[in-house]
Every structure is written in structure tokens, then in C-alpha cells.
Image (tube, rainbow, N blue to C red):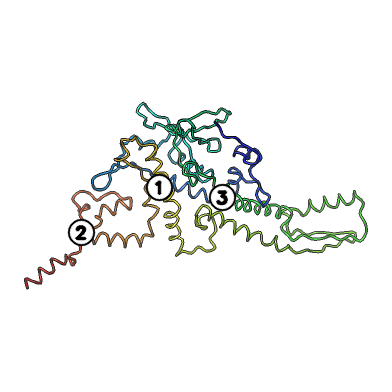
Amino acid sequence: MLSNSTLSNPQQWLSDMFKGSETSSGVSINEETAMNITSVYAAQKVIYETIASLPLLMYKRKEKGKQRDPDHHLYNLLHDEPNEEMTSFTFFELMQHHLLTWGNAYAEKEVDGMGRPLSLWPLNPAKTQVLRNPQTKRLEYFTTTPDGMTFKIPKDRMFHVAGLGNGIVGKSPIRMHREAIGLAKATEEFGARFFGEGATPSGIIEYPGALDDEAYERFVKDTRDAHSGLSKAHKLMILEQGLKYHQVGIPPEDAQFLETRKFQLNEIARIYRVPPHLIGDLEKATFSNIEHQSIEFVTHTIRPWLVRWEQAIKMQLFLPSEKKTHFAEFLIDGLLRGDIKSRYEAYAIARQNGWYSANDIRGLENDNPLPEGQGGDEYLVNGNMIPISAALKGGDNQ
């Protein structure tokens, strides 16, 4: 039942045996080696740490609005401890990393007699397959443990969050964009070799006579020992026996590798939809646009991932009888808060027009409500604003 692997269409594990697929830049890239690239690591880190830091709450639907339900059986599982070895932060950090790297996040469900999840245990996405049973037409999951044992997990015992793919299994962003990531890796390696050979322009040493093999080898060794490496750059070179040094400028293609690295950093940021300033490129960042870029990051990058998570939780973790009455939602308000001046101006408008009470505003600022009797729950309206119907009635009476 397991799918076959051929040389023309190798499975992921076979490709990984040879350190990944080779790119046009000559660098082999797979999900593991890609994480050694600083821009890939930084772009993923800002996403998975942001998501892992958000509180995930359970809500009960009301006739008007919603109500938090901290007593729901999923609250402790998703808000505090998905299993006895992980905090919720560690769990979501790991699972989101799997999504950003392999395009899928898998966790085996440990359930009670009623089918309610008790624990969620993350699985290695590189060692997990999703297959459709040809007889039952149902999805089945096969995972391989570190000791090489493969076993089947029924669909109702698996929690699976999939990224972009065929609707069932997500595709690896690393493999989809391996050429861009491979070029980023190649420029890193080029830079390391460039500085390893000496951060000064290379040159030619001219000798008027001829050196025998032994003298040549000794000269090359002594020169490299004395001048090769970043720490020995710009060190004075002493020549004897008529030797002359001719400096050679850096070839233009070598001098441009820093620009190439900067371009590839922006390419990685584009792949993960992360503002460049969040992964260390402040060239185009200003005090006026960083706040708006950060809000756009939440709106266009973080929020779609949260919706994907919330829908997967509702579909796979809630009992069928709960799906119409309960839902899970990440608390994202704190990420969308502007600067203090803008917030307070917005609060003033909401307060004066009766949208928010003082305690509503204090709650948004993570402050305790006012003591009872101080009007914290009262809603105010502007006395100068009255319905037009009342104004017309007043005019008729004059």
C-alpha cells in the first residue's frame, strides 16, 4: 500500500539520504540544511514564535456574541499543556516550524473513552505519509519512529494541519523555492571562502628566477600561514630575494556578492511574507512605516495561519456535538495595537460615542476594572447628539 520510490521520482527520505536535491547554484538543499541559512531561520522564527506566544482560548456561542469557556475540556490542552512533556508555546512553536518547513504539521491524538483528546504528540513530518485506502477510500497515516518501526494511525487519531497543497497534504515551501534558497546558501559559502582566503585583494608574486619544487612548496606554505585568513588581513608582507608583489583588484562578480546576499535575504522574506526589517534588513525601514509594516505582517502573514489553525482545531479536536456551540480563537488584539497616542485617541472616540465603557477600555489595556460603584461599566453618549426625529419634534413644538 505504501507508494513506490523511483530514481526519477524519489521520495523525500531517499533524497535526504544524499543531503537533498542539488540546485542550479550547485548547493544541495533540503528541509534540514535550509535551516542553516540565517535568513530562512530568522523568517521562520519570527512567525512561529509570534504564533506560539498568542493565547488560544475556547469560546461558547451566545445568542448575542460569545463567551469565554475556560472549563472546556480543550482549554487546558491547547492553552497550557498539549502533553505532559510540552508547554503550549513549545508545541505550537514546533508544529508551526513543521508547517513552514515541510508544509504539514502532524500530532497523534491520545483520547479518552468518549473520544475527547487528552494529549497531542507531534510527529516528524519527514517520516509521516498520508495515503488513501483503496478499499475504504478513507485517509490513513503512516509514520516511522526513530528506531525504524512504521505503524499506521487512523484518521480519527491524527491531528493534521496542512499548508498549501492539494487540499489534503501540504507542499514543502523549502522544496518549492529550493533554487532561491540554494542561491542564498551559495552566497553564504562564497562569503566564507572569500574571507577565509584573506579579506584583502588577491595578488601575484613575481620571482625573477626559478624555484625548485621544495622551495616552491615551502614558500606557498609560509605565505598562507602568514597572510591567509580574516585575522591576518592587511598584515605587512616582507619579500626577499627579488620577489615582487603585484596587487590584483577584486573581480566585479566577487565584489557584488554582498548585494546578492541582500537580494536573497529579501527573496526569503518574500517567500515567507515577512517584512525585511523583522529579519534584520533595516535599509528601507523608517519610524513612520515600521508600525504599519508590523500591522500588515499580523494581518497578511500571521492571521491566515491562525485561521488555518482555528479551522483545523474545530474540524478535528471538537466533538461533533460541540461544533455548533463552541470554537477556538487566538487572542490577537495585542499584536494590532498601534502607538499609545493613536490608541488613546481611538478609545476617546469610542467612549464619547457609547461604544466602549471605561472597563471595556481598561480590559483592552490589560488593566483591572474600576472598583464597583465608580461607573466603570456605564456607557456614555454625547449630549449634543440626538436622533433627528427628536430634533424634528422639538422644532414642531416651537
Which amino acid lies under the numbered mark 1 shown in the image of this protein? Val
Query: Would residue 257 appear left or right of 46 to someone viewing this image?
Result: right
Which amino acid lies under the numbered mark 2 shown in the image of this protein? Leu
The spot of residue 138 in percent (x, y) is: 45, 33
Tell me which numbered mark, 2 or 1, is placed earlier along the sequence.
1
The local secondary structure at tag 2 comes to loop
The local secondary structure at tag 3 comes to helix
Residue 40's tag is 3
Q: Nearer the viewer, residue 178 or 86?
A: 178
The spot of residue 3 in percent (x, y) is: 57, 34
- Most distant residue in the bottom direction: 398
Report how many numbered discs are placed on residues in the image: 3
**Disc 3 residue crowd, few under 14, some 14–19, many 20+, Cα 10 Å:** many
User: Which label lies toward us, 2 or 1?
Assistant: 1
Separation of disc 2 and disc 1 at Cα?
Answer: 35 Å
Which residue is tagged 2?
380
Which amino acid lies under the numbered mark 3 shown in the image of this protein? Val
